[in-house]
Amino acid sequence: MRARRSRAVSLLVTSVVLTGFLLPGALARDEAPGPVPAPGTDVQAPAVVDLAQIPAEPPVQPAKPAKRELFGADCDTEINGSQVVAFCHNGYPQTDLVRLHVECDRWWDVDGDGAAVAVGPAGRVELSGRCWKEVRSAWVSHQRQ
């Protein structure tokens, strides 16, 4: 019982204190006619909306974009030291020409672009490449046949 009584008293005191802070500002706002604008500034009247001008129906929705055509093999690329291996699986009905690109970290190491390999529908392929030293990045590009 004691906890509820003190909780009720604290809520009452808090509301009285907040009202005491808000009341002088509300009274001052009602008494003052408003700030006087500086000379040379334009004062605009508040916007008024005529309800008769609002359309009864919602606006026309834009056309949905064309359905995206499904294409492209799913490839996972693994880098181990200077070796790169990409495993690709084509889950779509069109043949995809995949090509492995390897960018080497050292300036004197030659970057490699592999030959295009056709991956047919439901087909799998493994692509490999390498650098003499470290590999900076590797990716697979896709092309329609």
Image (cartoon, grey):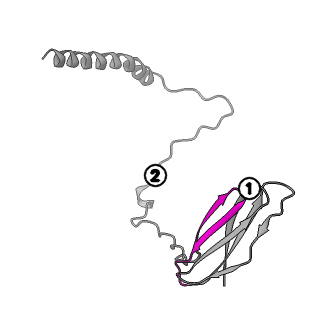
Query: Where in the figure is residue 44, as x and y percent of width and height?
Result: 57, 41
> Which mark, residue 136?
1
Apparent side of residue 40 relative to residue 61 in the rendered image (left or right): right
| Frontmost residue, 37 versus 95 | 95
Rendered position, 69 above or below 60? below
Query: Where in the figure is residue 105, as x and y percent of width and height?
Result: 78, 54
CA gap, disc 2 and disc 1: 61 Å
Provide the residue span drawn in magenta.
74-93
> Which mark, residue 99?
none
Give the quadrant of the N terminus.
top left
Q: Amino acid type of disc 2?
A: Val
**120 magenta-colored:** no
Q: Amino acid type of disc 1?
A: Arg
Residue reaching furthest to the left: 1
Give the quadrant of the C terminus.
bottom right
Instruction: Identify which residue is drawn at 33% across, 19% down.
Output: 19
**86 magenta-colored:** yes
- First in sequence: mark 2 or mark 1? 2
The residue carrying mark 2 is 49
* Quarter-of-image position of residue 36: top right
Rendered position, 9 above or below 77? above
Is label 2 in contact with label 1 (beta carbons under 8 Å)? no
Apparent side of residue 133 relative to residue 76 in the rendered image (left or right): right
